[in-house]
Image: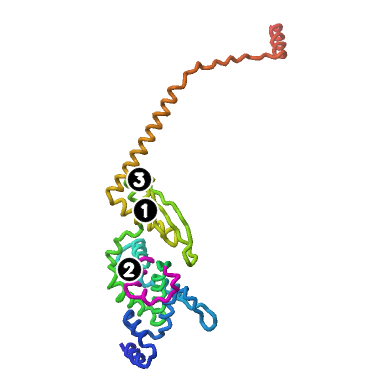
């Protein structure tokens, strides 16, 4: 409480009051070192450098924030789910700290509007928001310490935006879910990388197609093969809920069975048309050498 009062007094004499107030609305407290928070929102595409020529961006803060976020979320999940096993806790934590969730949280608290980046990077913002969120956590940790950082996550992030019990039951591994469905329904599922290209910033982009019984069920794009497969599987899971798509799969299976049956019948007919042949009798003539004849003659004389 006293610290906040001191920060408010300091704010009266601050030149950049608007920035402090902006961060206060997000944090619930006034920053001590506002430059940490500003740097947390600097994407590497801005190409800014310090007076010493070092790059000015949020990558180092992102690295720190990633570790702090894992620790704090692990702490929160551990205490919330008393008695749950390690695998369950790890899975639940991963659902919170995964890129998709962090991207969404960054937008919900308004960080997306504060990030500074080159317009060329707009196509790559599937990483940008989540990375900035992690960097922001790193800035809070350096500026205020672990406990204040944990309090921020609990009061400003978890309680307003995340239902831990609901999230723990949510299925987020779309690929695993699709494979599980295919095994249960005895259907063949395959993932094929159909295209790989580079975006405007020379970042590799992957496009994957998922097929069910040979029929295209969805395509997904991502900045990793895993991400593209997950997106393709997510689309396929929606497809299998439509009667039209399932009807096309059943039709394909029937056609496949028909083709196999016709091939088997044709093979049987071809075998039946082959004329029977008399078995070849091979006469083995025993060859007796002159030496053996001589030995036999000598033996008969002896007898």
- State the residue position of label 2: 77
Pointer 2 with pointer 1, Cβ within 8 A: no
Please tell me in which quadrant of the rendered image residue 88 appears.
Answer: bottom left
Give the quadrant of the N terminus.
Answer: bottom left
Residue on which the image places disc 1? 218
Foreground mark, 2 or 1? 1
Residue neighbourhood size for the residue with mark 3, other residues' Cα within 10 Å, grouped as few (<14), some (14–19), many (≥20) = some
The mark closer to the camera, 3 or 2, is 3
Looking at the image, what colour scheme do you see?
rainbow
The residue range painted magenta reads 98-122
In the rendered view, would you say 260 is above or below 144? Answer: above
Residue 144 image position (x, y, % from top left) = 38, 82
Q: Is residue 23 above or below residue 133?
A: below
Q: Secondary structure at mark 2?
A: helix
Q: Nearer the viewer, residue 129 or 82?
A: 129
Number of numbered discs: 3
Q: Compare marks 3 and 2 and give the one earlier in the sequence.
A: 2
């Amino acid at each position: 409480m006293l610290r906040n009062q001191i920060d408010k007094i300091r704010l009266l004499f601050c030149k950049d009051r608007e920035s402090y107030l902006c961060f206060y609305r997000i944090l619930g407290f006034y920053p001590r070192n506002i430059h940490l928070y500003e740097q947390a929102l600097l994407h590497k595409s801005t190409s800014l450098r310090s007076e010493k020529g070092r790059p000015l961006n949020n990558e180092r803060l992102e690295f720190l924030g990633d570790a702090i976020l894992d620790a704090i979320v692990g702490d929160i999940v551990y205490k919330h789910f008393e008695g749950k096993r390690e695998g369950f806790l790890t899975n639940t934590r991963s659902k919170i700290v995964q890129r998709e969730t962090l991207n969404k949280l960054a937008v919900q608290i308004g960080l997306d509007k504060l990030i500074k980046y080159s317009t060329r990077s707009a196509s790559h913002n599937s990483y940008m928001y989540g990375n900035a969120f992690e960097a922001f956590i790193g800035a809070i940790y350096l500026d205020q310490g672990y406990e204040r950082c944990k309090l921020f996550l609990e009061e400003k992030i978890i309680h307003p935006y995340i239902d831990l019990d609901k999230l723990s039951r949510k299925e987020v591994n779309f690929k695993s879910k699709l494979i599980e469905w295919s095994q249960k329904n005895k259907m063949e599922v395959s993932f094929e990388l159909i295209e790989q290209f580079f975006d405007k910033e020379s970042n590799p982009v992957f496009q994957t197609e998922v097929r069910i019984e040979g029929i295209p069920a969805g395509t997904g794009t991502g900045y990793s093969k895993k991400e593209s497969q997950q997106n393709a599987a997510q689309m396929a899971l929606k497809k299998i809920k439509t009667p039209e798509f399932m009807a096309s799969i059943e039709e394909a299976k029937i056609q496949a069975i028909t083709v196999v049956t016709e091939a088997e019948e044709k093979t049987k007919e071809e075998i039946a048309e082959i004329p029977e042949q008399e078995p070849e009798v091979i006469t083995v003539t025993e060859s007796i050498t002159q030496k053996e004849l001589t030995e036999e003659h000598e033996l008969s004389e002896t007898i």
